[in-house]
Amino acid sequence: MPQRSSFPLRHNDWIPLGLRRMEERRLQRVRALSTMAASVDDDATTSPQLPFDPKSFDPTDETIPPLSPSQFYTDGQIPMPKALSPSAILEFQKCPQSYLFQYLLGLRQGTNEALARGTFCHTALENVFDLIPEERTLDNLHNLFRKAWSDERLSGDYRGLFEDDKEETATRNLDAEVRWGKSALALLDNYYQLEDPRSVPVPNPLAREIWVSSELLSDRGDAFLVRGIVDRVDLINGPNLRIVDYKTGKCPDFKYSPATNDRIAHESFFQLKIYALLVREMMRKQQADEEGNGGVNGGGEGGSPRRKSSGLPMNLRARIPVRNLRLIYLTSKDGGPAKYLDCDLGATEEARNAELDRIQEDIGRVW
């Protein structure tokens, strides 16, 4: 029987996994590679041929020669990605070689504790708004995290996080799992002190966990697809839209020179500015489609605020502009409280478009 864990789990919160499929454990975090599955965001056009079996690859094995891109594509041609995501763009800007191995060759490390903590905190923060305002209590926010984790803790993606690396019999380190769970609940405590979800005004959030995507043009005139998932969209005074993104990392510290602080702010909001750009382009396409169809929307019926699709949800189709971007950091320096950072894209449509056009030029140069 699977071992139980608690941080703490109340008796009624525990969901038995029963006959839940037991996928093969991924490689432990100490290994450099996990699997060669195609990336969700940035699929290569063809699958590379590896000179080794990625499932048994061990970077400590000195008999394996250093890796070279020529070993993966024997024809010498590295394919272009099918799409770019904000995270892929940022990775390329930081280190093109890291982008090559992660997003084109599919060589990525497996899930670690920090990534898992972020994933399940995001899930709880998304699902808490399924509840009526009076039920969005801190206890229920904790329980949503517990429920999400108990559903997935023994799945293939997360099973190996707290298991000792043994060949035949893996024992689960429940103490480590409890510490990890409590650290995640502490982040949710921080969020609740910053923003009480019971007080978020109707109709917010307008949307949660939605796909945004659009074809953009590079500086050479090539069309390419950019896509990503927005955590949350709110309606604010104006009316305008605010794009909200939850961050489980620490809030940046603006204690440096003005030039350095400006660079930190630009890097922090770059992802959200890409989302704002994609929403603008999707609204423009929607308007063009409606005009071409005599005012009939071609995006389909029954859109849901949480539906992950290439079209905008129904309640975002009024072409209300995105003006504000908000980063909600669930912790700060030395484990401090949650903080949020806001970015105003501009008071006028011309100012907003000029800023988003600059972002599009930056992305076009990456492609």
Image: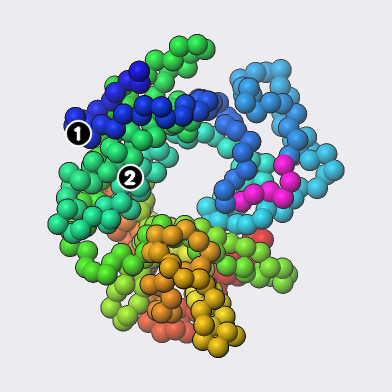
Q: Give the vertical position of 13 relative to 137 (above or below).
A: above
Quarter-of-image position of residue 176: top left
Residue found 35% across the figure and 48% down from its top: 122
Quarter-of-image position of residue 51: top right
Q: Which mark is residue 227?
A: none
Residue 207 % position (x, y): 37, 64
Residue 105 % position (x, y): 67, 41
Does the image show residue 217? yes
Location of the N terminus (image quadrant): top left
Viewed as shown, does residue 104 lie left or right of 241?
A: right
133 inside magenta stretch: no
Which residue is at the far left? 134
Residue 116 % position (x, y): 40, 38
Between the residue at mark 1 and the residue at mark 2, the CA separation in whole angstroms equals 20 Å
Question: Quick one: label 1 or label 2, which is nearer the N terminus?
Answer: 1
Circle 2: element type: helix
Viewed as shown, does residue 238 lie left or right of 292?
A: left
Residue found 45% across the figure and 11% down from its top: 169
Q: Give the vertical position of 167 relative to 225 (above or below).
A: above
Q: Which mark is residue 12?
A: 1
Quarter-of-image position of residue 14: top left
Location of the C terminus (image quadrant): bottom right
Does the image show residue 276? no
Mark 1: few/some/many CA within 10 Å (<14, 14-19, 20+): few
Q: Amino acid at mark 1?
A: Asn
* Residue that numbered label 2 is attached to: 121
Residue 258 % position (x, y): 40, 63
Q: CB under 8 Å between callouts 1 and 2?
A: no
Region rendered in magenta: 42-47
Task: Tell which of 5 and 254 is nearer to you.
Answer: 5
